[in-house]
Image: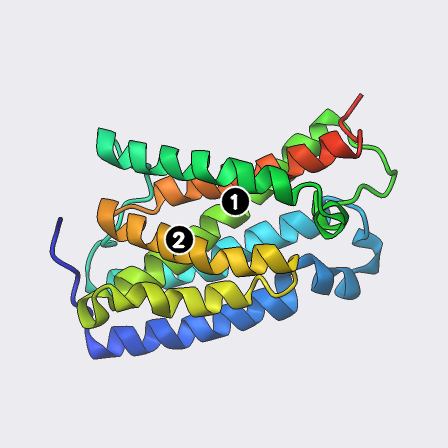
Amino acid sequence: MTAPRAYSERTLQLLLGWCAVAVIVAEFVLIPMRSRVWFPDWQGSLNTFVWWAVGLFVVWVVVPALIMRRDGPLPFSVAPPRDVRGLALYGALIAVMLPALFIASRRPDFLATYPLLRPASGQWTTALLLAYWGCYACILFSTEFFFRGVLQFGLESRLGLLSIGVSVLPYCLIHAHKPFPEALGSIIAGYVLGWLALRTRSIGGGAVVHCAVAIGMDAMALTYNKAWPT
């Protein structure tokens, strides 16, 4: 394992200050429940997810990455781990989560939440579903980059493993809009994905797991509601 990157006091102040701003922007400007108020005509359209995906990529990836690079290259990789142990750890995590996901998919609050996009026409098309999942993947990559990458690796040299707990606090709070079991589960997921990120020095595996789980939730909801594109 490589030594943690020690960031200057000024860089950390800038980084943490921006992180606070970025979370507020994400919650009050970018998420669909807000953008549908700013742009009522977007109700039921892909525009809400394009806005969310592009906005998060800017405030959760581009800006903090530029701040961190003041002190050198990023201290983590965005590619999934290539070693067998790292791949096995992430594979085991997906296997453990699948049964819980299946049970959750039968809850009314789950079925009322997923998929997050509800087409205005009431019917999915293949093109719309794939475009929606593409936006979703960008959103989840930005989430992993921000919480498991920026916050954890930025604070690792000062806090060690405690940086995981610091990143979990805002991470669980952005799940306050989700079903209660998922919000609680985000705490466990945050710790597990955080430890794996530090262990593998990469956020790529977490992004893959996050995407697999999210698309799996959508697939289960679409199957249960018989809403797949025809």
Viewer-proximal residue, 65 or 176?
A: 176
**What coloring was used for the rendering?**
rainbow
Amino acid type at image mark 1:
Cys
Residue 67 drawn at (x, y percent): 32, 65
Classify mark 1: helix, strand or loop: helix
Residue 26 drawn at (x, y percent): 57, 65
Viewer-proximal residue, 215 or 29?
A: 215
Classify mark 2: helix, strand or loop: helix
User: Where on the picture, by quarter, is residue 35?
Assistant: bottom right
Viewer-proximal residue, 173 or 2?
A: 173
Residue at left offset 31%, top offset 62%: 152
- What's the mark number on residue 138? 1
Amino acid type at image mark 2:
Phe
Distance from Cα at disc 2 to Cα at disc 1: 10 Å
Inspect this view and state whether residue 161 appears. yes
Above or below: residue 41 compared with residue 17: above
On the rendered image, what quadrant is the C terminus found in?
Answer: top right
Residue at left offset 83%, top offset 59%: 40
Categorize mark 1 by other alpha carbons within 10 Å: few (<14), some (14-19), many (20+). some
Residue at left offset 40%, top offset 77%: 17
Please state if 161 lies on the left or on the right of 203 as rendered: left
- What's the mark number on residue 145? 2
Residue 179 drawn at (x, y percent): 66, 57
Q: Earlier in the sequence, mark 2 or mark 1?
A: 1
Above or below: residue 110 compared with residue 208: below
Residue at left offset 51%, top offset 69%: 23
